[in-house]
Amino acid sequence: MTLFSRGARHQSGYILILVASLLYLPARSNGQSIILDPPVVIPVGTLSISDIDFLNSTSPKLLFTIDMRTSPEGRTVDAIMELAVYVPAYNPDVQALYIKTRPFTIVSSRTVTNLDLGKSIQLETNRFDADARRWLENIALPSGWVPPGSYNFVVNVTPLGGGTATPPRTFSIVLTNASSIEPVFPLNGDQLTTSFPFFQWRYDGRTRISVFEKLENQGNLEEAASGVPLLTAVSETQSYQYPSAGVRPLQPGRTYVWYVEGLASTAGGTDVGQKSDLRWFTIASEGAAASTSTSTLLEELERALGPKYRALFDQIRAQGLLPQGTVRLNGTMISYADLLQWLNKIRTNPDAVTSVVLE
């Protein structure tokens, strides 16, 4: 008896081929699971305004990598990822940024970075909280750098069609950059009597100060600062005393240029600098009277005395009054540069002052 006609035999052969081919496809199952390894954070130290919206940044930075594995090994799993970012300094309970991807495929294992989001992995949701973004930008706009602090991430990867996944992973990116670098003393045109000046600036973090001599044939400050520095030193504070040994003293009658760089760690472990504006000053010739920046002196005095005397300092500025006479510390005459140095010490360590006499 003939069980199959010729056509039936051909149809049966196609079915066998189809079944055989399915056996060699990567296995997909409702029993699938995803293992999410601890994310790897790239230390960046600083981020600009464009960096915080890394999906739309024109020059994105690598910030983190997320490794995923399927179980049993070799499985192919379709999944979605959710990523939330919290900024404790703003509000630890508000999702400043929330991202949800469209389904993507994990074949045994897969690594995803922030550079993949919105590129090789498409997004379904990309929501940046308007108030959080406004808060960040208002702080960052003066310098272009977002405020320092901890930015906390929560990532969750869920398999489609059922299955299990590792509980959400958390990680943090800690920024150490300050909002800006502001040279305080000496300022442009200040004339100092000492060859070992005291430098002061505002910046929260490690810094590097560089001092250059401006030669007569150099037309501008940038040209002077492009040469070989007389001094380069790293400081952990907001000030630096020019050393009295080991470097060439600054010479009377000459002009000098200085700037400060804020140092931050990068992924490669190299320090990079956010540079302040250039400042220039001169060392007074012997016998010449020294002057200093009146605005700087008033500013430091106002800080030391507190807001109680704000009206007095406003009056001094309005009338254009200038400092005159001599300044004495414990009976010894000191320069305005020395006075600024002592005011800085008083402001940073007020407990060191045991008594004050005003004359």
Image (cartoon, rainbow, N blue to C red):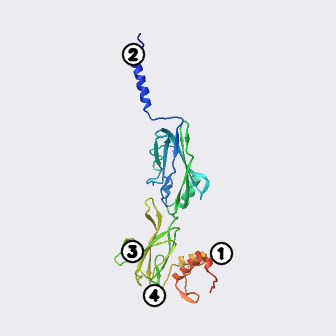
Residue 36: x and y in percent read 52, 46
What residue sits right under mark 2 in the picture?
7
Q: Between marks 1 and 4, how big is the CA–CA gap?
A: 36 Å
> Does the image show residue 185?
no
Q: State how far apart marks 3 and 2 are (Cα).
A: 91 Å
Q: Quick one: label 3 or label 2, which is nearer the N terminus?
A: 2
Which label's residue is closer to the chain start, 2 or 1? 2
Q: Which residue is mark 4?
A: 288
Up-down: is 48 above or below 24?
A: below
SS label for mark 2: helix
Residue 174 or residue 308, whichever sits in front: 174
Which residue is most to the left?
217
- In front: label 2 or label 1: 2
Q: Quadrant of residue 255?
A: bottom left
- In this rendering, the label closer to the viewer, 3 or 2: 2
Residue located beneath label 3 in the image: 229
Q: Residue furthest top?
A: 1
Query: For residue 308, which numbered disc appears in the image?
Result: 1
Residue type beneath disc 4 = Ala
